[in-house]
Image: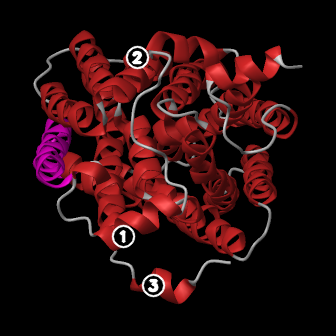
């Protein structure tokens, strides 16, 4: 058992790093959702239909998804510090560029650039968390940045809605560009890997390393070989398909929830923003308390690590099936209740999914696994907005869109249960080869 009194006496520099990573995710998700809030004004100004809005929602994910694996490999090659500095600087520029566009095509191009610049963000946070936190603190540390993605809707939707209603949609993007540049400065000044951080005490360094933190360093077999090896691994695909199923529902609500409330529930932009924050508040709490604190607490009490993580992972996905309830009502209170239950369950499972790359990766492979997982996940960011737009345009209802999201969740649950297996490190390629040769 861990000496909790001794652990409490260890300095807490690592938690400051965790908050910094969370702030970055918070801001880059506000950069993503501002388009959802601005959609009614953009639709009116450029004369867009539902399918065209869905295409616009998905544009960010074209480059974001396609660059996930290259971004993960870059992180494993050049490290979190260098890659994330460049990423935060470039996404600040891309965010501001959207405010200057004069047509539909220009907005799409700027969103594609924003997706490319933000591609390293989540894999970098996952890799950095693996470096900075022992295994028994990994779920809560991961929940800090994962919950920020949900909390961005709590503060970002009302903030952007206020700015857009008061000053117009261009200012909505301008404000987020300023927030992004402020984060670039903070990350540049504060973040270092543990081995290079002059403010990390020896006591805390020992606590991190002895607790099973991911070793710093590169893959011995090279980056291309690591990618090929991991793409053939069953655990990687069980994780990736399972997490992508979560991503379909998450991105559906991230992009379409404000418009759903405006179009289906006949709300104003400001009223829809108020209603939209309710599911995201519930999701933020579930993310931190269940997917973060509760998992670490149970593991710290000696419960089997795989059993705890997979139980919460699968149970959260099952709660996500509450999305079916939203298909059976036109009452906004009931709709928000069902969506809140669904998003809370999904949010509880998400930090576990994001903690797994650093828990199963061979040395030098965390960024690559995170990139593979987030590539498949964010292909749902491409697909979900477009399919939703097509279905809504054809039926003038969100019911079929929510049914599709539930069906995708069922597939993801099956991959988590039957394909992922135990949450334990994948052997390095040379170890796996030697083991096979000795059979």
Residue drawn 58% across the image and 64% down it: 292
Residue drawn 63% across the image and 51% down it: 352
Q: Residues within 10 Å of mark 2 (few under 14, many from 20)?
A: some
Mark 3 and mark 1 in contact (Cβ < 8 Å)? no
Q: Nearer the viewer, residue 26 or 14?
A: 14
What residue is disc 2 on? 70
Q: Position of residue 270 (x, y in %)?
A: 35, 55
Residue drawn 60% across the image and 45% down it: 359
Mark 1 residue element: helix
The colour scheme is secondary structure
Q: Is residue 139 left or right of residue 205?
A: right
Mark 2 residue element: helix
What residue is disc 1 on? 204
Sequence-first disc among 1 and 3 = 3
What residue is disc 3 on? 8
Q: Nearer the viewer, residue 149 or 426?
A: 426
Q: Position of residue 67 (x, y in %)?
A: 40, 17
Q: Position of residue 438 (x, y in %)?
A: 84, 19
Q: Nearer the viewer, residue 95 or 298?
A: 298
Mark 3 and mark 2 in contact (Cβ < 8 Å)? no
Looking at the rendered image, the disc whose residue lies closer to the viewer, 2 or 1, is 1
Looking at the rendered image, the disc whose residue lies closer to the viewer, 1 or 3, is 1
Q: Residues within 10 Å of mark 1 (few under 14, many from 20)?
A: many
Residue 318 sits above or below residue 293 on the image: above
The answer to whether residue 49 of the structure is visible from this angle is no
- Magenta residue span: 166-192
Q: State which quarter of the image contains the C terminus.
A: top right
Q: CA distance from mark 2 to mark 1?
A: 32 Å
Q: Is residue 429 on the magenta stretch?
A: no
Q: CA distance from mark 2 to mark 3?
A: 39 Å
Q: CA distance from mark 1 to mark 3?
A: 11 Å
């Amino acid at each position: 058992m861990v000496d909790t009194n001794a652990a409490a006496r260890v300095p807490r520099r690592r938690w400051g790093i965790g908050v910094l990573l969370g702030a970055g995710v918070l801001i880059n998700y506000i950069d993503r959702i501002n388009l959802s809030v601005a959609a009614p004004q953009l639709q009116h100004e450029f004369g867009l239909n539902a399918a065209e809005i869905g295409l616009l929602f998905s544009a960010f994910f074209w480059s974001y998804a396609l660059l996930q694996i290259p971004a993960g490999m870059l992180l494993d090659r050049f490290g979190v510090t260098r890659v994330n500095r460049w990423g935060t600087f470039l996404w600040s520029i891309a965010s501001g560029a959207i405010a200057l566009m004069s047509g539909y095509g220009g907005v799409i191009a700027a969103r594609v650039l924003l997706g490319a610049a933000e591609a390293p963000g989540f894999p970098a946070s996952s890799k950095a968390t693996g470096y900075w936190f022992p295994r028994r603190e990994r779920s809560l540390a991961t929940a800090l940045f994962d919950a920020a993605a949900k909390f961005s809707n709590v503060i970002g939707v009302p903030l952007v809605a206020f700015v857009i209603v008061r000053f117009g949609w261009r200012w909505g993007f301008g404000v987020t560009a300023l927030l992004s540049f402020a984060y670039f400065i903070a990350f540049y000044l504060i973040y270092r890997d543990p081995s290079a951080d002059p403010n990390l005490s020896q006591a805390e360094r020992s606590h991190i390393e002895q607790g099973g933190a991911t070793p710093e360093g590169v893959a011995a077999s090279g980056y291309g070989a690591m990618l090929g090896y991991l793409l053939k691994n069953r655990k990687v695909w069980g994780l990736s398909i399972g997490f992508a199923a979560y991503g379909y529902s998450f991105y559906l609500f991230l992009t379409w929830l404000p418009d759903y409330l405006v179009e289906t529930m006949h709300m104003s932009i400001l009223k829809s923003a108020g209603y939209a924050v309710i599911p995201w508040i519930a999701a933020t709490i579930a993310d931190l308390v269940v997917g973060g604190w509760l998992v670490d607490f149970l593991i710290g009490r000696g419960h089997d690590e795989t059993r705890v993580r997979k139980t919460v992972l699968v149970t959260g996905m099952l709660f996500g099936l509450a999305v079916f309830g939203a298909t059976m009502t036109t009452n906004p209170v009931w709709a928000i209740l069902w969506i809140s239950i669904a998003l809370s369950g999904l949010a509880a499972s998400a930090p576990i999914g994001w903690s797994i790359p650093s828990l199963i990766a061979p040395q030098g492979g965390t960024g690559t696994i995170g990139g593979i997982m987030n590539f498949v996940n964010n292909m749902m960011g491409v697909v979900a907005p477009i399919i939703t737009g097509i279905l809504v345009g054809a039926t003038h209802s969100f019911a079929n869109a929510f049914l599709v999201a539930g069906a995708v969740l069922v597939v993801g649950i099956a991959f988590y249960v039957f394909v992922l297996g135990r949450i334990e490190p994948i052997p390095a390629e040379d170890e796996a080869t030697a083991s096979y040769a000795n059979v």
